[in-house]
Image (spheres, rainbow, N blue to C red):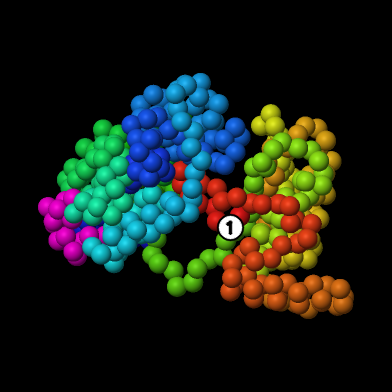
Amino acid sequence: MRMDNGRIILHIDMNSYFASVEQQANPFLRGKPIGITGKNQERSVVATASIEAKKLGVKTAMSTWEAKKICPSIILWPGDPEKYADIMHRFNAIYRSFTEHVEEFSVDESFLDLTEEAQDYLGATCMAQAIRERVSEACGPHITASIGIAPNRLMAKLASESVKPNGLTVVRPHEVLNLLDQSDLEDLCGIGHGIREHLSQLGIESFQQLREFPLERLMEEFHGYGLWLHEAAWGREVVQEPSHTSEPAKSYGHSYTLPFNTNDPVVLKRYLLGLADKVAWRLRRDGVAARRISAHVRFADFSGHGEQRTSIEPITDGLRLFKIAWQILAPFLQHAPVRLVGLTASLISSDPKRTSLFKKEQHMQSVLSSLDLLQHRYGSGIWKRASTLPVEFKSRSSGFRFDHEL
């Protein structure tokens, strides 16, 4: 790993992105508190609140009933992931017209390395204003962004978060510590609630105290993350050297909130089998297999249950994943109506494509290989088992990502 310095990084974060896109598209929504939700609004959360709704106390990930209680006038609007993805591609096309060094951080955030193009912070500021004008021209004036410019990604993101909405904050190297000391620990990307609580137990309540805390103690408490915390407190970013080989994922999983609460085993089996096939396809696509299967449910009262089992043989077949997952969940499904089902495959290893000794399994392997060719060519939704035909997995949007695997 190395510490990156001498760069000029721009972080651009669209303000209330999903909501502002809908307000741009629909004049009726402009200037009003709106919350973007899933298709089933009564069972959804607020994926994004408009600026007007945020001012009234509505927050991202708040349940819709809670949002209505806080803001009775809120307009709940179903999200459109395809629309947001299309506009995201427009943003990034604009960014790449300024620099080829663009990193898409999330659906509404990107980092731009302007070191070569801008040469100095004045040049970067001018480019930021030009980008903002281009975005407004291409996508409409109701879609705005907050921009931060700093020596690295960590500080650029903190800078963009410091003035919202529609802010532009420039933090030169000598101003980094001042920005940190005006910020709370949790304002920094990478310090979540758990890390924050651990730091508090050590008597660390500010970045100044974090800078003064011995690195050796941080390493003892947080292991490798201690170095990251130490460097972050000084406004430096620890950057991993690029690897020539990408590491495989440690797990593959999907969960899905059902369109209605139910403990009907037929319905639950259909959804769980559909999820298992999608997990299995991703395993085969990446040339890996799994030996540990975890399954979980969330009930209507938001309580839940989950367990895991380990298989002797590596698995890449969705039907085998489903059978194990159903064995885990079946004893608990009569307790209460189920709201969500999920399945995760882990203990990942490379799949050597072993040929089974049994003709039935050989036939299934041949069928799956043919179906995988179709999926590679036409997409993961090209086929379904007959038993899952009634099941429709709708695309979901959240404040951080789209789930088009479903």
Q: Amino acid at mark 1?
A: Glu
Extent of the magenta region: 113-129
**Quarter residue 388 falls in:** bottom right
Residue ID at (18%, 42%): 175
Pick the quarter of the image with the C terminus: bottom right
**Residue 274 colored in magenta in the image:** no
Q: Position of residue 404 (x, y in %)?
A: 55, 56
Q: Using the image, determine if residue 60 lies above or below residue 134.
A: above
Pick the quarter of the image with the N terminus: bottom left
* Residue to which mark 1 is pinned: 405
> Is residue 295 visible in the rendered structure shown here?
yes
User: Furthest-left residue in view?
Assistant: 122
Q: Position of residue 400 (x, y in %)?
A: 46, 47
Q: Nearer the viewer, residue 271 or 308?
A: 271
> Is residue 200 visible in the rendered structure shown here?
no
- Horizontal relation, residue 394 to residue 213: left or right: right
Helix, strand or loop at label 1? It is loop
Residue ID at (33%, 31%): 31
Q: Secondary structure of the magenta portion, mostly?
A: helix
**Residue 128 colored in magenta in the image:** yes
